[in-house]
Amino acid sequence: MKLTTLDIAGTTTAAVAVGADAFLPLDAPDLGTLLAAGDWRQRAEAALASAAAPVRLDDDGVRIAALVPRAGKVVCCGLNYADHITEMGRDLPQYPTLFAKFADTLTGPGDDITVTESTQVDWEAELAVVVGRTLSGADEAEAEAAIAGFSVANDISMRDWQRRTLQWFQGKAFDASTPVGPVMVTADAVESTEFAGDGFTVRGYVNGELVQEGRTRTLVFGPAKLLSYISRFTTLRPGDLILTGTPGGVGMGMMPPRFLRDGDVVVTEIDGIGRLENRVHLPV
Amino acid sequence: MKLTTLDIAGTTTAAVAVGADAFLPLDAPDLGTLLAAGDWRQRAEAALASAAAPVRLDDDGVRIAALVPRAGKVVCCGLNYADHITEMGRDLPQYPTLFAKFADTLTGPGDDITVTESTQVDWEAELAVVVGRTLSGADEAEAEAAIAGFSVANDISMRDWQRRTLQWFQGKAFDASTPVGPVMVTADAVESTEFAGDGFTVRGYVNGELVQEGRTRTLVFGPAKLLSYISRFTTLRPGDLILTGTPGGVGMGMMPPRFLRDGDVVVTEIDGIGRLENRVHLPV
């Protein structure tokens, strides 16, 4: 099952996918609110069993919004791909490096990203995990059972701002700079395929050129470990979003460093989950 | 005028102070929601002009809640007191060091603080600033005019978690660990007194012993500068909270380092604004 948040003429609604570009709206203002209701699966199944006419992405005024536009918490993990860490000659970390974003930082899977205050805009393709149940002090089994599903994110980072001080937050929290979506694929729909085997393959492209590729089986802290760890200090709730970190291949790591230019198109893709395509506007 | 959020028998409400321990409830579920309504000053003045019977803190089931229990954004500044920075032999920073908390991290001005997962619990007495208007790309004058008022916070920090990785977030985001309140003193009520002169004096005590004392005139980035800077990358909204950093005297900086013990009482005080008193429970 694939769920998302649609924006229909300026109003958001949770929705379930019935085809590539067709969705049935559900009675909740966004996916996070739907998940908090608890009976989201039954509601989505009832909609799918109905004869309701779907909303289509090519209908006037319809677009996919940020997956969880009012997420209470967005917690991100840095330095999490073992292959990238070892290729950089570093030791594997004992603890996840975590930082926060606010919901205002999120944007839709096809939205343009406009940044006026940075000249070092970089990409970070990531697997996103959506929390489905309230979690506090959870062990890994409980955390895994609380994963509602998976999505795609790009933690677009303003490296000049990120490196102004020791704390990355200001370079990671620009409004409407982190696309996430286009859908959440429910955990049950992936367990028997990509995720239980070699993990997902996360790819990032800039203007069609493959710049990042990583397999989530090499995550030092996988989804359940991350949710369990975070839940030891703060309660996770339905609709909260965890970004699991990015594999090698970001622009800052290139020699010389490469940053996005006005008009560049960033594509972020995870097989079996979805694809983001965002054009970057850098008016300065 | 002094505004706050009361918890009356488990339900929160915005309220205006009519005396030391007496408040008139206002028609909003918390101070942040009241500020978002725009006409908060008129509403509070109308309540003060009415003959309504006040709620008292010694009434059954009445306590002061976290000042803005549903704040959309809590942004904190580290390394901000010039006297402390220069006494440490460091250069004054060019940019503010910023990190984020979520609203779940906040707690009431008299609440006990229970931490089960850390053995290095430290104090950070701070001036808190409450945002009163939506701010985006604001200059300092606009930012100053958008300050609804000032309050007191203690950015209780779990140093072991904070230092596990380069990013401080996990040591700063424990649920219900940052007391804030007891009231917001409106900006107009302080402009002509403490704030325009030598600044506020921020003091921290542990079990009655003065451990921190700083004057906000020595802030490298004062309230208006901070709000203006933050608004360049993310929109600030009514009820958002900015913590302005702590002066010297935290436990981690002592020789040897000193951390809180089970049962210790932390008092945080700013003359003309208010006082927090929180007992720390460390069951491990």
Image (cartoon, coloured by chain):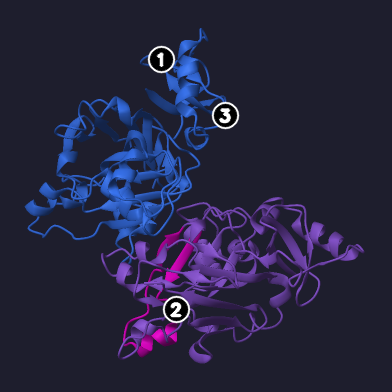
Chain colours: A blue, B purple
User: Disc 2 marks which amino acid?
Assistant: Trp
| On screen, residue B12 above or below A261 | below
Residue name at image x 86 percent, y 60 percent: B46
Q: Secondary structure at mark 2?
A: loop
Q: Between disc 1 and disc 3, whose residue precedes?
A: 3
| Structural distance between the alpha carbons of marks 2 and 3 | 45 Å
Numbered disc in front, either 1 or 3: 1
Q: Secondary structure at mark 3?
A: loop
Residue name at image x 28 percent, y 35 percent: A266
Q: Chain of mark 3?
A: A
The answer to whether tags 1 and 3 share a subunit is: yes
Numbered disc in front, either 2 or 3: 2
Residue identified by numbered label 3: A10
User: Disc 3 marks which amino acid?
Assistant: Gly
Residue identified by numbered label 1: A18
User: Disc 1 marks which amino acid?
Assistant: Val
Q: Secondary structure at mark 1?
A: loop
